[in-house]
Amino acid sequence: MPNLEIELNPIDFITIGTIGPKGQRVFYLQAGQGMKLVSMIIEKEQSWALSEAIKELMDELDSRIEDRNPGELPPRDMDLREPIEPVFRISQLGLGYDEEQDKIVLVAQELITDDIDDESVEPSIVRIWCSRKQIRALSDHAMDTVRAGRADPKQNGSLVYYWM
């Protein structure tokens, strides 16, 4: 769906989850606003990198911004919601902070594959506006989701030699 532009501001929830057995999991980034649900395919490595980037951004913001909205983290219901119908596979992710709204924006850009011959096709974009608490919960959950994969390195699909 090239040239799709979706703006979710503000969101009700955001999560990263997987479908499939270990070793064959497909990762999804999903957010919702009211009745609007947006799912995108995200790579495992992108999930990890996003979690790390969020932590860096939040550390920087925490050092210079007084918390205007103290309180508990949002509920940790981080399950994917049905129906899971991805609008696209993510190519690039970006993070920003809007001080006026006190919100984090997560921007996901579509991967344009080589099978699309038209060079004028622009990638689709999804902008997800989150509270600092929501994005922090996403970071923690994304890291947990990535780690929940193959706990045994012998099961990672590549040949590994072990000496005892």
Image (spheres, helix red, strand yellow):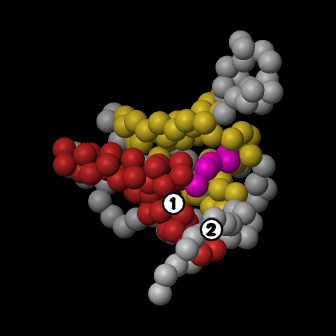
Q: Position of residue 52 (x, y in %)?
A: 39, 52
Q: Which mark is first along the chain, 2 or 1? A: 1
Residue 95 visible: yes
- Secondary element at image label 1: helix
Going 58% across and 55% down the picture, which residue do you hit?
A: 44
Asked whether residue 129 is drawn in magenta, I would say no
Q: For residue 5, which numbered disc appears in the image? A: none
Q: Position of residue 144 (x, y in %)?
A: 50, 68
Q: Position of residue 102 (x, y in %)?
A: 35, 41
Q: For residue 142, which numbered disc appears in the image? A: 1
Q: Nearer the viewer, residue 147 or 108?
A: 147
Q: Is residue 65 left or right of residue 163?
A: left
Which amino acid, by three-letter code, is at mark 1? Ala
Q: Which residues are magenta?
A: 40-44
The residue to which callout 2 is attached is: 159
Q: Is residue 51 left or right of residue 84?
A: left
Mark 1 Cα-neighbour bin, 10 Å: few <14, some 14–19, many ≥20: many
Q: Position of residue 117 (x, y in %)?
A: 80, 18
CA distance separating discs 1 and 2: 27 Å
Asked whether residue 43 is drawn in magenta, I would say yes
Going 54% across and 63% down the picture, which residue do you hit?
A: 146
Taking the view exactly as shown, the residue that stands out farthest to the bottom is 164
Q: Is residue 71 left or right of residue 91?
A: left
Asked whether disc 1 touches disc 2, contact meaning CB atoms under 8 Å apart, the reply is no
The answer to which quarter of the image holds residue 150 is bottom right
Which amino acid, by three-letter code, is at mark 2? Leu
Q: Nearer the viewer, residue 81 or 46?
A: 46
